[in-house]
């Protein structure tokens, strides 16, 4: 253990950490601006009368009045603070906590890269972010330093390797490699793909994208650890992310990953363009990493390695039942479409009628609810409560198409969903996936 502590405490050039702080702050600033420009704050967290908080977080509520707009304004200030180095550790911690609160409000808006942002902010809050190019360090020059402990570099690299490993592993399945789905569906409606049709058909492009994407995402990240092949592995990943961002609506994710992958180069790489990015203490006798810190990181990565595997504890296809799907880095490997009808039964009279929940959900909430069983269950409970009838039964006729297959029933139409409870146990009322 002491040998590991010494190795993790060895000094490495601090330039990489300063550059990552600036890049991440800039990307998060753009992300917050997008929420304002596209009207997502009001559409996602103000207008909808119903939200789908994560299990165990039903007590969370959006801030009243203009509170959510003020919250996102604070997030923008924190992102800029991280970028310019104004109390950057506090900015990282607060941004991660507040952004996690926003994401926990509604499962319907879950995105893997937002989850990654929360993780990165939490990790960066443990690191000496004022090593260089920092407004805080201008007033406290003792914070400037040319080196940081090696655990900072290894921790960030390990986090991205985890993301790529599970994302790449999830793509090695028949739909992706044999049917080239859902890539074929996406490219068929992509304006960028249609512009390439004189050179390559959509079918060929889908096959190349599926096989190439699976190979690059799984194999290229470990090769970044090898100096001789690192430039080629990085070029392959950059090409993959740039093409994905050009052909598909992926938001900030491709650009975040392209910048973050520079972590795998020698830690002093930013000095080629910015020689004075840090100007503090030279390497000295390193202090051993605190045991509590190593314990925290150990628990973090244990969770990161186990959480994506939890879907194996559930029967059936995770792409269909989505039990254990979130937080598992199953990035863009399924496309689902559905339609649903809800029916209520009064157990006292036997009367049965169709519930018409128009106007209760935003378009995005409704689109996610149609195909995700836990959201169907949550919405059935909402509908039951709104009837005002004690013990009312709510059943659903939900039919879903997975990756271009014919529509099939998703939930058992005979089960009273109003009597079912959400939780982490397998849900027997989810019907088996189509073959």
Image (tube, rainbow, N blue to C red):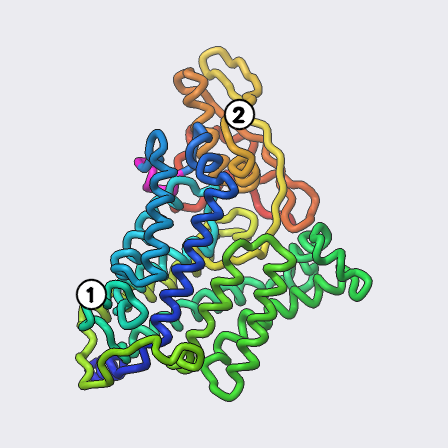
Q: Give the range drawn in magenta.
A: 53-59
Q: What element carries label 1?
A: helix
In the image, 168 versus 31, the foreground residue is 31
Residue 313: tell me if it is visible: no
* Residue 32 rendering spot, x and y as whole percentages: 43, 49
Q: Is the magenta stretch mostly helix, strand or loop?
A: loop
Can you identify the residue that label 1 sits on? 139
Q: Residue at x 49, y 47 (%)?
A: 34
Q: In which quarter of the image is the N terminus?
A: bottom left
Q: Which residue is drawn at 45% across and 35% down?
A: 42
Note whether 164 is above or below 432 in the view shown: below
Q: Residue at x 44, y 39 (%)?
A: 41
- Left of 180 or right of it: where is 146? left
Q: Which quarter of the picture shows residue 69?
A: top left
Separation (CA) of disc 1 from disc 2: 53 Å
Residue 338: tell me if it is visible: yes
- Left of 174 or right of it: where is 154? left
Note whether 394 is above or below 157 in the view shown: above
Can you identify the residue that label 2 sits on? 359
């Amino acid at each position: 253990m002491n040998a590991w502590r010494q190795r993790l405490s060895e000094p490495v050039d601090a330039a990489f950490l300063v550059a990552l702080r600036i890049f991440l702050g800039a990307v998060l600033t753009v992300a917050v601006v997008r929420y304002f420009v596209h009207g997502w704050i009001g559409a996602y967290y103000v207008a909808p009368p119903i939200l789908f908080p994560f299990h165990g977080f039903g007590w969370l509520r959006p801030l009243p009045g203009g509170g959510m707009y003020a919250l996102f304004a604070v997030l923008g200030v924190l992102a800029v603070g991280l970028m310019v180095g104004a109390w950057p550790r506090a900015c990282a911690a607060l941004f991660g906590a507040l952004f996690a609160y926003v994401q926990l409000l509604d499962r319907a808006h879950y995105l893997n890269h937002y989850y990654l942002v929360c993780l990165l902010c939490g990790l960066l809050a443990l690191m000496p972010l004022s090593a260089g190019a920092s407004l805080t360090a201008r007033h406290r020059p003792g914070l400037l330093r040319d080196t940081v402990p090696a655990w900072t570099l290894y921790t960030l690299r390990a986090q991205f390797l985890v993301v790529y490993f599970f994302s790449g592993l999830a793509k090695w399945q028949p739909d992706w490699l044999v049917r080239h789905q859902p890539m074929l569906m996406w490219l068929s409606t992509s304006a960028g793909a249609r512009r390439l049709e004189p050179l390559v058909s959509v079918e060929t492009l889908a096959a190349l994208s599926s096989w190439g994407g699976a190979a690059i995402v799984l194999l290229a990240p470990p090769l970044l650890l090898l100096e001789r092949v690192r430039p080629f592995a990085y070029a392959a990943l950059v090409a993959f992310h740039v093409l994905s961002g050009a052909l598909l609506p992926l938001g900030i994710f491709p650009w975040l990953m392209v910048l973050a992958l520079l972590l795998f180069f020698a830690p002093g790489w930013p000095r080629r363009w910015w020689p004075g990015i840090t100007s503090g203490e030279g390497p000295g006798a390193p202090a051993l990493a605190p045991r509590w810190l190593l314990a925290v990181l150990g628990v973090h990565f244990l969770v990161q390695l186990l959480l994506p595997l939890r879907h194996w504890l559930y029967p059936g296809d995770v792409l269909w039942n989505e039990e254990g799907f979130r937080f598992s880095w199953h990035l863009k490997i399924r496309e689902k479409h559905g339609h649903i009808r809800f029916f209520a039964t009064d157990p006292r009279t036997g009367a049965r009628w169709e519930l018409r929940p128009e106007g209760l959900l935003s378009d995005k909430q409704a689109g996610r609810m149609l195909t995700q069983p836990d959201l169907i269950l949550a919405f059935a409970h909402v509908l039951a409560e709104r009837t005002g009838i004690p013990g009312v039964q709510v059943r659903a006729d939900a039919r879903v198409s997975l990756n271009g297959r014919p529509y099939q029933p998703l939930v058992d139409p005979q089960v009273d969903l109003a009597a079912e409870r959400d939780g982490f146990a397998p849900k027997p009322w989810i019907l088996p996936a189509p073959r």
